[in-house]
Image (spheres, rainbow, N blue to C red):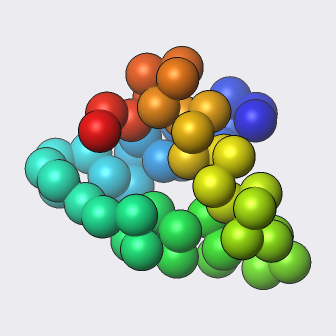
Amino acid sequence: MSKIIDRQISKHFKGKGHFGRDTLSSFLTDLDPEITESALTWRIHDLVKRKVIDT
């Protein structure tokens, strides 16, 4: 996943505290309307693994 998307996520969710998978999925779908459910799951896993987001 690109650093640009990482920055967009950090900027969008900064100061919002906790947010759910649905909220993040909606945001990622807005960035890429053709993303599949399995790709969403992988991207979220990757974001957690790289500590862009926390669980």
Q: Residue at x 48, y 47 (%)?
A: 9
Which is more toward the observer, 17 or 8? 17
Quarter of the image holding residue 29? bottom right
15 relative position to 13: left or right: left
Residue 6 seen = no
Q: Quadrant of the C terminus?
A: top left
Percent position (x, y) of residue 30? 64, 76
Residue 15 seen = yes
Q: Residue at x 26, y 45 (%)?
A: 14
Percent position (x, y) of residue 45? 57, 39
Percent position (x, y) of residue 11? 40, 45
Q: Residue furthest right?
A: 34
Which is more toward the observer, 42 or 13? 42
Quarter of the image holding residue 34? bottom right
Q: Is residue 18 above or below residue 47?
A: below
Q: Is residue 31 above or below residue 44?
A: below
